């Protein structure tokens, strides 16, 4: 297939996934900001959402202070921010449109109808009090798109590139959502492992739809290292880094077999997968969770680039 | 004017034979049924051709070209004459273009003024002396026809560059099949759905000699912002070839490749839907981001076929048009089967004088214009408009030709207040490769406004399904 078609499919899936995760990220910040506060003078959960989204520079070029209003606007609505929900949905649609015939009708309708619906929303829909409905809708539409891909796409290279895009993006985004916890400081008098800490971890689990999964897997109260283990190392957790890397390796392997070529992207995916498969959560906490996640995000960026290089994007 | 026009269905009580079935059918239907079917048709177009509806979003108003649900019908005899005439005309046009860029015998025999060809903006000097595969320049030609009487058809203009609209021809038939299966079953209609296959066959037949037995064909589009993008993706899809943009192609050692996920793949034939000027920034407009650097060099080296050829537009000029009957006689030694509309050349003093005297009854056209722009419709113009136009003609006589206002035929059309006659034209698509093929019929355009003669979609025209009856 044309490299451009593969590239567009890859990015179409990435942007749909990113829109969904941006919604999840805002959701975490909303949940955390609703927890009881100490005196707020340092960075708070809204600042942390901006940092975790990797939008620090674009945000502070426009706004002085991170507040619910400014952050939600920047991450959800602002088309000048290429990673905002609306910008992602618009770019996703553009990518889909230029390879319209490589998509199934259901995929296209999922992407197109979402964009048509979202761009009609007025600014009022994005206030902190009302944005929850928009966020739910974004998640819903992204899940619909994923369902359309799974249920209607021919299993050929077009499908494999779409899936690659989804999982490369999801791995990056789960790492970022988990990293929010690092940037959110506990109120001064609040002990690590105390109730606020507990609720913050719970908020992260909820935002990635993993609270129930946590209880099923651990049958234990919420403990930070187990939350991290679930979202990083557990293969049965569909948004975990391990699960995503497993999928990435699988899709690359199928492509490698179909085309008879393998490259640096195959090696790197294998390396990252092996680190997760054989990694231990206490070792990760010893190096530092934040350091681990930062390194992972950097490497997954390189992996995305290498996929593009190998397939002539 | 409407009253004097030839109606292709004829009197309701005594319709012409080809329309007997449709006349019965129309008489049996309540207006509400037609209205409901029209709404259903619109829904169908929005769904099946979903990108019709979206490609103009943001900026241009969203536009579906209106589809009229009542078919236009040609009987077997009418079509057989047209078909022979079209084949003859496209053979002559190709011979003319080959001659323009080759021996120039037509000019040397004094059949056409040299300046009209050599100083024409449509003349591409870089094509002189270049051999193209099979000697074919216009592989896909759209010949616009009008009808004024039972046996009287005229060619209005030739589109040898990149005629569009064939996707409407195909989608219109699909729509009729879905909406009126019974009506279709009561007729014997020659199918059109094999057009993409014929197109692919034509394109493969003009692959350069260096290509393998299974040449790679691609469709080159300016991209998804082009207004005809829907058609580009539709045709690529139906032919099963890649729809490429300039950036997907690279030229190395005078060979064209496309970038695929398996590596580079050689390209042999490019059905290009971008204009000459944008094809290659090294050869033409350096600011073109749509083209492929080095493409012209590969073309000149004979390593790739462009369809249609660069420079084919020389035959689209409305002054050159007046010489097409002479081309048929000169190159084929035959009498033209299809007639031209009698045309005055303003470049010639006595004809110009007559044009200026009769402006109120003539249509004056810019020889390089298209899409119904830059023209004066004498009978519909005000005196001031005619005077202003007369000055334009005097200032640049070479730029204008004039024709009598033809009373275009009408077909029953479903409009606001029921079924009424509206003027139509016809664009058959002629495919020229190793042989010439025509899918029966073409695209019928209809002027939806009462009395209007302008069928262009940019000016309120619609389209109809066009039936050619078998036997």
Image: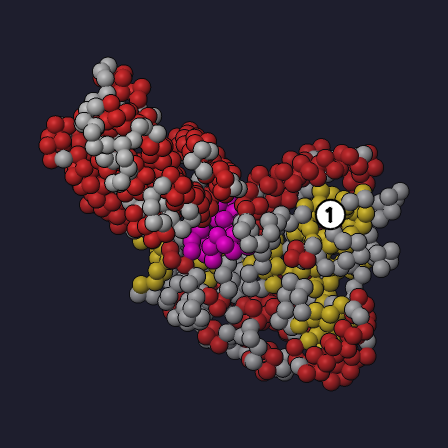
Q: Quadrant of residue A291?
A: top left
Give the residue at x 79% y 54%.
Answer: B450
Q: Residue furthest bottom?
A: B349
> How far from the left and from the top, in percent, is residue B73?
74, 47
Crowding near pointer 1: few (<14 within 10 Å), some, many (20+)? many
Name of the residue lying farthest toward the front:
A39
Direction top: furthest residue: A219
Magenta stretch contains residue B422: no
Confirm whether residue B232 shows in the render. yes
In the picture, the quarter occupied by the N terminus of chain B is bottom right
Measured as percent of width and height from the top left, residue B286 is found at 41, 70
Q: In the image, residue A154 lies at what x, y percent?
A: 40, 34
Chain letter of disc 1 in the image: B
Image coloring type: secondary structure
Q: Is residue A13 visible?
A: no
Viewer-closest of B21 and A66: A66
Choose between B104 and A312: the one closer to the eye. Answer: A312
Tag 1 residue: B72
Q: Is residue B279 left or right of residue A269?
A: right
Q: Is residue B390 above or below residue A200?
A: below
**Is B53 on the left or on the right of A115, as rendered?**
right
Q: Quadrant of the image for the C terminus of chain B?
A: top right
Residue name at image x 78 percent, y 34 percent? B32
| Residue visible at 20% across and 32% down in the picture | A188
Secondary structure, mark 1, is strand
Where A92 falls versus A215 (above or below)?
below
Residue at the extreme right of the image, as rendered = B13
> Which quadrant would residue B190 be assigned to in this image?
top right
Image-quadrant location for residue A216? top left
Q: Start and end of the magenta stretch?
A: B218-245
């Amino acid at each position: 297939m044309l490299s451009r078609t593969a590239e567009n499919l890859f990015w179409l899936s990435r942007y749909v996934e990113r829109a969904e995760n941006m919604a999840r990220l805002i959701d975490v910040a909303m949940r955390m900001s609703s927890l009881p506060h100490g005196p707020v003078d340092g960075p708070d959960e809204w600042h942390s959402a901006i940092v975790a989204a990797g939008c620090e520079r674009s945000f502070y070029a426009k706004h002085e202070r991170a507040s619910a209003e400014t952050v939600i606007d920047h991450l959800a609505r602002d088309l000048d921010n290429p990673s905002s929900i609306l910008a992602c949905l618009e770019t996703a649609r553009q990518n889909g449109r230029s390879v319209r015939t490589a998509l199934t009708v259901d995929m296209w309708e999922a992407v197109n109808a979402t964009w048509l619906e979202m761009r009609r929303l007025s600014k009022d829909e994005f206030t902190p009090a009302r944005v929850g409905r928009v966020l739910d809708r974004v998640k819903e539409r992204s899940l619909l798109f994923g369902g359309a891909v799974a249920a209607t796409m021919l299993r050929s290279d077009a499908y494999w590139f779409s899936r690659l895009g989804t999982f490369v993006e999801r791995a990056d985004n789960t790492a970022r959502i988990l990293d929010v916890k690092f940037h959110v400081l506990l109120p001064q008098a609040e002990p690590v492992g105390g109730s606020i800490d507990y609720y913050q971890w719970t908020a992260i689990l909820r935002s990635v739809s993993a609270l129930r999964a946590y209880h099923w897997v651990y049958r234990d109260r919420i403990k930070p290292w187990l939350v991290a283990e679930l979202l990083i190392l557990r293969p049965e957790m569909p948004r975990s880094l391990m699960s995503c890397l497993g999928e990435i390796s699988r899709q690359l392997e199928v492509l490698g077999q179909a085309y008879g070529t393998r490259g640096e992207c195959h090696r790197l995916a294998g390396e990252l997968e092996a680190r997760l498969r054989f990694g231990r959560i206490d070792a990760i906490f010893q190096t530092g969770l934040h350091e681990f996640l930062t390194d992972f995000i950097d490497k997954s960026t390189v992996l995305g680039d290498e996929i593009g290089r190998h397939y002539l994007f | 004017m409407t009253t004097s026009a030839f109606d292709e269905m004829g009197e309701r009580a005594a319709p012409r034979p080809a329309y007997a079935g449709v006349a019965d059918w129309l008489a049996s239907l309540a207006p509400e049924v037609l209205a409901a079917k029209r709404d259903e048709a619109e829904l169908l177009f929005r769904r099946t051709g979903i990108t019709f509806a979206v490609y103009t979003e943001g900026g241009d108003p969203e536009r579906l070209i209106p589809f009229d649900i009542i078919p236009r019908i040609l009987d077997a005899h009418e079509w057989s004459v047209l078909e022979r005439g079209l084949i003859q005309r496209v053979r002559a046009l190709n011979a003319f273009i080959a001659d323009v860029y080759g021996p120039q015998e037509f000019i040397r025999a004094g059949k056409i003024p040299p300046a009209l060809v050599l100083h024409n903006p449509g003349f591409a000097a870089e094509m002189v002396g270049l051999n193209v595969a099979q000697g074919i320049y216009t592989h896909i030609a759209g010949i616009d026809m009008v009808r004024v009487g039972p046996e009287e058809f005229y060619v209005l203009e030739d589109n040898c560059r990149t005629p569009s609209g064939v996707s409407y021809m195909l989608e219109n038939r699909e729509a009729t099949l879905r909406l009126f299966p019974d009506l279709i079953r009561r007729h014997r209609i020659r199918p059109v759905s094999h057009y993409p296959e014929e197109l692919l066959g034509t394109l493969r037949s003009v692959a350069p000699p260096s290509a393998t037995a299974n040449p790679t064909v691609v469709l080159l589009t300016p991209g998804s912002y082009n207004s005809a993008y829907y058609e580009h993706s539709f045709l690529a899809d139906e032919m099963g070839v890649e729809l490429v943009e300039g950036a997907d192609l690279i030229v190395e050692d005078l060979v064209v490749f496309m970038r695929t996920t398996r590596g580079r793949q050689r390209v042999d034939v490019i059905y290009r839907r971008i204009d000459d000027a944008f094809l290659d920034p090294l050869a033409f407009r350096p600011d073109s981001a749509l083209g492929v650097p080095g493409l012209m060099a590969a073309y000149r080296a004979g390593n790739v076929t462009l369809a249609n050829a660069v420079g084919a537009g020389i035959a689209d000029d409305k002054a050159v048009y007046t010489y097409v009957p002479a081309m048929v006689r000169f190159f084929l030694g035959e009498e033209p089967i299809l007639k031209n509309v009698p045309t005055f050349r303003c470049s010639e003093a006595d004809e110009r004088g007559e044009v200026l005297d009769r402006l109120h009854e003539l249509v004056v056209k810019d020889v390089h214009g298209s899409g119904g722009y830059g023209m004066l419709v004498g009978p519909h113009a005000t005196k001031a408009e005619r005077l202003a136009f007369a000055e334009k003609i005097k200032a640049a006589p070479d730029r204008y030709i004039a024709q009598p206002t033809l009373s275009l035929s009408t077909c029953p059309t479903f409009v606001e207040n029921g079924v009424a006659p509206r003027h139509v034209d016809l664009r058959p698509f002629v495919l020229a490769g190793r042989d010439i093929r025509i899918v029966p019929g073409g695209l019928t355009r209809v002027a939806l406004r009462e009395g209007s003669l302008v069928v262009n979609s940019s000016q309120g025209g619609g389209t109809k399904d066009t039936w050619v009856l078998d036997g």
